[in-house]
Amino acid sequence: MMHSADLQKKFNFKLIAGEAGLNRPINNTDLSRPGLEMAGYFSHYSSDRIQILGTTETSFFEMLSKEDKAERMNKLCRKETPCIIIARGITPPDELIDACNRKDTPLFTSEDATTNLISRLTSYLETQLAPVTSLHGVLVDVYGIGVLITGDSGVGKSETALELVKRGHRLVADDNVEIKEVSRNVLMGSPPKLIEHLLEIRGLGIINIMTLFGAGSILPEKRVMLNINLETWDRNKMYDRVGLVEETLAILDSEITKKTIPVKPGRNLAVIIEVAAMNYRLNKMGVNTAEEFTNRLNAQIKNQSLKEN
């Protein structure tokens, strides 16, 4: 859970008042500029949001009577309000400082312009408060594509990742991947701190990828874009041989492209995953080899049929 103290530390805000409330949780990614509240309209006050006061709000506030100033600031500070931030380094009104101290609402000041402050805060909050899940698998950056390798235990996920690292690609996480949904269909994967940079190879044990291959062999975070699911080759199962089958893997409320790769001795999985990543990039650029082959095949069948008739 994120608290007001975390926000102060991240953005180096200056604490003016309400120090006792620094442990207040932040649960809402939305921000609020309480302009109507300054005018006395609190019927729809979004009190659970971080409140941002800029030049407009503080200028209007100075036009109020002494009694109205105290009353508005008192209503602005509620027990569910995470914090109040004043932009542009504006000196906070005494009435606001007094209300924040009495109600333990953290009051910060920032030197940033209001719009810039809102943009930075929104981006940070959306990332930090994004829905999170964990998946069993290995996440590797292959040619700039975040490839999530999944499959049953012992199928060869970590060994394949090791081969990919040796071929110049980068490891993000082994065994357990923490995934955040920062927006619809945008998933960011990272390793738990306990196993960061580590890879488990049966027979060897746990190895440190960064120590063995250098800092260029690891990434702290990567967008998850393609799922390669490894499974033991089943002779009775029909596998896609053209590339027209569109599979997806659902993660939280998002979906990513999924490819099922059968595993048996003699198959070079690292090379297959490299090609899968490059082919994924081509597809995103509008080049679909499977469709081109199908169209070519259909045209040939049509021509042959015309000749026979």
Image (cartoon, helix red, strand yellow):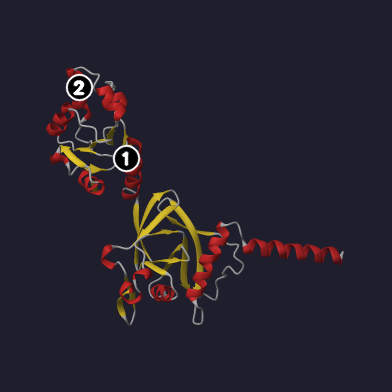
- Real-space Cα separation, disc 1 to disc 2, in angstroms: 25 Å
User: What residue did someone put label 1 on?
Assistant: 117
Residue at left 19%, top 28%?
93
Which corner quadrant holds the C terminus?
bottom right
- Name the side, left or right, on which 286 lies relative to 55: right
Residue 43's place in the image compared with 79, above or below, is above
How far across and how far down the image is residue 60, in percent?
28, 22
How far across and how far down the image is residue 11, in percent?
26, 46
Q: Disc 1 residue type?
A: Leu
Give the label, 1 or 2, closer to the camera: 1
How far across and how far down the image is residue 10, in percent?
25, 49
- Name the side, left or right, on which 209 lies relative to 97: right
Residue at left 39%, top 56%?
188
Q: Quadrant of residue 29?
A: top left
Mark 2 crowdedness (10 Å alpha carbons): few <14, some 14-19, many ≥20: many
Q: Disc 2 residue type?
A: Lys
| SS class, disc 2 | helix
- Of all residues shown, which one is farthest toward the right? 309
- Residue nearest the observer in this picture, 146 or 294: 146
Residue at left 60%, top 62%?
244
Q: Are marks 1 and 2 in contact (CB under 8 Å)?
A: no
User: What residue did someone put label 2 on?
Assistant: 69
- Name the side, left or right, on which 267 lies relative to 19: right
